[in-house]
């Protein structure tokens, strides 16, 4: 071996020794084979004559016995094709008031409002032959409380069929390029499911089968609204893919606030979950944050105030082993006896040195100052919430409206100590919808909080998450019976083509929307068609230029909400396999 290829590490030396041992074993086997041939030679000579003995001896002496030739093996890793698999997304249940939360961190929920309405809207696209993938919605009931069993096998009964399952050859066969008449057909189907999760309001999971050996366009969104009770407000959240690593930013556990972490396991395997908590003074150590077991098809609710009390801005890191899980935080507030809104905090982007958060709604300067000027409302204004899980960081915050970045009264630069969280207020802005961008010299977790309402009455919050760029194509569902905007942002400028998806299954005419550099553009779902805007169930967004980030801001009679538009799931189609011996 030349000096250029000498092993430099213990692992390389171990690999080399193993290869040399294999060579030695092969050589020993060859020599044993040759010795066996020599021992058989006299017998052969006795039967066939001296000429044969001389011939064999000459062959052995000359070394003309050809050793077995090792086959040529391409050791490069290549993907081994796998069957296409269904995609899953977890939908948060409607907000519920914790009952018995003071007894510990496990909780059951009971509805409070008499006017609460909740639903899940699922939108699916067909393939180019007009065929829809099979899909279903399953309930993920809460684990039984302590003393009532371990909750194993606590599945929520038979799933509800949304669209019929296709035969296996349709699911795994070649993708269609057209219908039977040779003309490509693309349609949609829209399903509204009222009161998902049953009376308990449990989380649900939407499963969509592949078709033509690949995933088709699909999306689902849950929405909640109530006009009375402690949980008055509007809440909309996207149904997102389960995972093994989630970050959630902006939970509040101060007096009058309730934050409940909801973990859901839609998979067929048990999952063991661990939590890491970060507060205003640094990491929070608490019992009960590891070894949290979720059976298949089960959810569990944990009151964060029992783990980290009196935190104004808490960040939660959820890691799972085994089955992938969904994670959200249900949060509501009371300012005395006045409802302070409801929100679902959804996972935000993993720690990074940059973050983009589209869809932040800010009230007028006058209304915002009037709300935060009330006693006990000082922290209620719009804000950016940052956490530095590893090293301390210096962050620069930029807020961009329709015309680009706007001036921030606080200047935009903030120090975030290692392991701690920081709130950066966004007071003094005009009423509009914005995109927040964060750049830092060390990885950060970012979230933002919007505000609506007036002083002296109920208010409501929205939780905004950081998202990656959309990718080429993304279907976005619209929450039913709300005013909703698709909020788009591109740092360097770009463009998108937006095709409305209608409730009758048809796709409308595509519209092109240009995005200026560092500008936020809000596109109303209802404004995508000239007809009845309530018939728009979603939109198919295709990026035609640049890197585009998106969110949805939702406005109802009871308040506001927001949810991220994350890149489309990319199912695994193969695993790397290296051939060798």
Image (cartoon, rainbow, N blue to C red):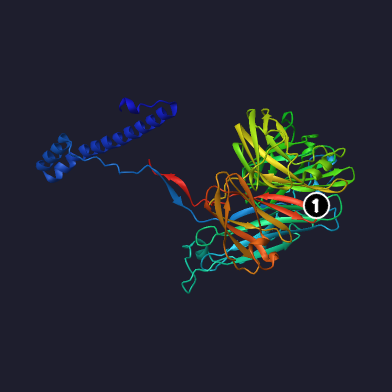
Residue 339 is situated, as x and y percent measured from the top left of the image, at: 85, 47
* 400 lies above or below 512: above
Where residue 215 appears, x then y in whole percent? Answer: 54, 57
- Residue reaching furthest bottom? 181
**Image position of 305 (left or right of 563):** right
Q: State the quadrant of the C terminus.
A: top left
Which residue sits at x=30%, y=37%? Answer: 29
Viewer-side residue, 122 vs 357: 357
Residue 364 in sight in this render: yes
View extreme (right): residue: 337
Picture quarter containing residue 113?
Answer: bottom right
Q: Whole-percent x and y of residue 536?
A: 66, 64
User: In front: 280, or 26?
Assistant: 280
Q: Which residue is found at the position 46% from the left and 62% from the top?
A: 174
Residue identified by numbered label 1: 233
Q: Which residue is drawn at 11% across and 43% down?
A: 49
| Disc 1 element | strand
Q: In this view, does 25 lie to the left or right of 297?
A: left
Q: Tell me the crowding category of disc 1: few under 14, some 14 to 19, or many 20 or more residues within 10 angstroms, Cα based.
A: many
Does the image show residue 568?
Answer: no
* Left or right of 367 in this view: 33: left
The quarter holding residue 313 reads: top right
Residue extending farthest to the left is: 51
In the rendered view of the protein, which quadrant contains the N terminus? top left
From what the image shows, is residue 401 above or below residue 425?
below
Tally the marks. Answer: 1
- Residue occupying the point 26% across, 38% down: 33
Q: Nearer the viewer, residue 120 or 360?
A: 360
Expressed as whole percent of the image width and height from the top left, the position of residue 255 reads 84, 38
């Amino acid at each position: 071996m030349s000096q250029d290829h000498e092993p430099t590490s213990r692992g390389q030396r171990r690999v080399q020794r193993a290869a040399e041992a294999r060579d030695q074993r092969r050589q020993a086997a060859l020599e044993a084979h040759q010795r066996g041939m020599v021992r058989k030679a006299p017998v052969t000579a006795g039967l066939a004559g001296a000429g044969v003995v001389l011939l064999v001896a000459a062959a052995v002496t000359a070394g003309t016995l050809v050793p077995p030739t090792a086959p040529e093996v391409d050791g490069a890793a290549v993907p081994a094709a796998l069957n296409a698999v269904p995609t899953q997304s977890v939908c948060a249940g409607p907000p519920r008031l914790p009952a018995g939360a003071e007894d510990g961190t496990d909780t059951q929920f009971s509805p409070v409002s008499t006017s609460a309405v909740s639903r899940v809207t699922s939108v699916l696209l067909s393939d180019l032959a007009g065929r829809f993938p099979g899909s279903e919605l399953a309930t993920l009931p809460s684990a039984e409380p302590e003393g009532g069993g371990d909750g194993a096998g606590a599945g929520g009964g038979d799933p509800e069929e949304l669209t019929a399952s296709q035969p296996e050859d349709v699911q795994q066969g070649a993708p269609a390029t057209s219908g039977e008449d040779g003309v490509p057909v693309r349609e949609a189907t829209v399903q509204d499911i009222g009161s998902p999760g049953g009376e308990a309001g449990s989380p649900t999971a939407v499963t969509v089968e592949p078709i033509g050996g690949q995933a088709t366009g699909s999306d689902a969104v849950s929405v909640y609204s109530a006009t009375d009770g402690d949980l008055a407000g509007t809440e909309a959240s996207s149904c997102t893919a389960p995972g093994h690593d989630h970050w959630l930013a902006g939970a509040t556990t101060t007096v009058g606030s309730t934050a409940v972490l909801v973990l859901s396991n839609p998979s067929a395997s048990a999952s063991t979950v661990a939590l890491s908590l970060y507060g205003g003074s640094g990491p929070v150590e608490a019992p009960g944050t590891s070894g949290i077991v979720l059976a298949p098809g089960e959810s569990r609710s944990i009151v964060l105030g029992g783990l980290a009390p009196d935190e104004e801005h808490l960040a939660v890191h959820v890691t799972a082993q085994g089955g992938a899980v969904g994670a959200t935080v249900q949060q509501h507030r009371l300012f005395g006896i006045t409802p302070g809104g409801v929100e679902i905090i959804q996972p935000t982007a993993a720690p990074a040195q940059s973050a983009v958060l589209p869809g932040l709604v800010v009230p007028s300067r006058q209304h915002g100052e009037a709300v935060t000027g009330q006693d006990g409302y000082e922290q209620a204004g719009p804000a950016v919430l940052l956490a530095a899980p590893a090293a301390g960081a210096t962050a620069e915050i930029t807020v961009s409206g329709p015309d680009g970045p706007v001036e921030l009264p606080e200047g935009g630069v903030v120090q975030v100590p290692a392991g701690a969280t920081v709130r950066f207020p966004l007071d003094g802005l005009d009423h509009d919808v914005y995109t927040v961008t964060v750049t830092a010299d060390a990885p950060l977790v970012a979230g933002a909080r919007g505000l609506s309402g007036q002083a002296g009455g109920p208010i409501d919050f929205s939780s905004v998450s950081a998202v990656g760029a959309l990718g080429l194509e993304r279907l976005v569902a619209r929450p039913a019976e709300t005013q909703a905007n698709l909020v788009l942002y591109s740092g360097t400028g770009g463009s998108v083509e937006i095709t409305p998806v209608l409730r009758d299954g048809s796709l409308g005419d595509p519209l092109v929307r240009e995005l200026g550099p560092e500008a936020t553009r809000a596109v109303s779902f209802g404004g995508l068609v000239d007809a009845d805007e309530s018939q728009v169930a979603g939109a198919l967004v295709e990026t035609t230029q640049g890197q585009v980030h998106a969110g949805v801001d939702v406005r109802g009679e009871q308040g506001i909400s927001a949810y991220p538009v994350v890149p489309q799931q990319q199912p695994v189609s193969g695993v790397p396999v290296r051939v060798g011996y």
